[in-house]
Amino acid sequence: MMAIASMLSLASCDDKETEGLTGITYYAVLDLEGETEMVVNKGDTFVDPGFTATLNGENVNDQVVINSNVNTNKSGVYKVTYSVTNADGFTASSSRTVIVLDLNDDVEGFYIVDASSYRDYNGTTTAFGRPFQVLVINNGDGTYTVDDILGGWYSQRAGYGANYNMEAIITINDDDTVTLEDSYIPGWGDGLTDFEGTFDATASTFTYRAVYVSGMAFNVTMSKE
């Protein structure tokens, strides 16, 4: 009798622990419509291309939670995230990058690094070899953010990824010279030690020398797409 009572007690505990849980878990599937990276002209309305969410073959678009910080009144790189969670707490998610650019800004936009740009490392020069894309954003305070002042050398050419973009804040002066205000590369936690450059407004071209560490300098020419 004691053994039976003990077994009944354990079964009762198991029932309590599993109460409210489904026997089979169906995971949601979330697919984005359109591009995962979009460019929107400053001042225009961002129109979300949409998404499709399904759970066990049924459309659950109405259960998708959207979080967005997109502000089309200010140039910048923004994120829209989408997520949907099933009854057991498992979440499917995806995201879209929205880049807001002022098409009337002579400086702001995407630039292509000339393949003949090169790194000078203690007198040994190595060309970039192929073009890479760099984004320049107007900060609205007289400065611009360059998403990788190293021209994609580590993040794109070496394949290290975005953590090795060296973001830089620059000012373009009245005499077309460029002043470096700040720079930082998260992957190594440091920045440039010296910089000199110019911006040709007629050709929409930056030409500069960025010194990273002792004996290493990046000589970059990049032109607006």
Image: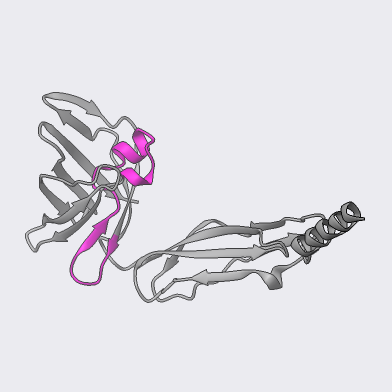
Which residue is at a point 25% across and 32% down the rendered structure image?
A: 116
Identity of the residue furthest to the front in this view: 2
Question: Does residue 202 appear to the left or right of 123 in the view shown?
Answer: right
Q: Nearer the viewer, residue 12 or 191?
A: 12
Residue 75 position within the rendered picture, expressed as x and y whole percent measured from the top left:
34, 68
Instruction: Say if 123 sits above or below 34 in the image.
Output: above
Q: Quadrant of the N terminus?
A: bottom right
Q: Nearer the viewer, residue 55 or 222?
A: 55
Which residue is at a point 31% across and 29% down the rendered structure image?
A: 129
Residue 142, image quadrant = bottom left
Residue 27 position within the rendered picture, expressed as x and y whole percent measured from the top left:
72, 55
Read off the magenta span: 137-164
Is residue 162 on the magenta stretch? yes
Residue 181 position within the rendered picture, expressed as x and y whole percent measured from the top left:
13, 58
Instruction: Say if 128 sits above or below 103 in the image.
Output: above
Display coloring: one colour
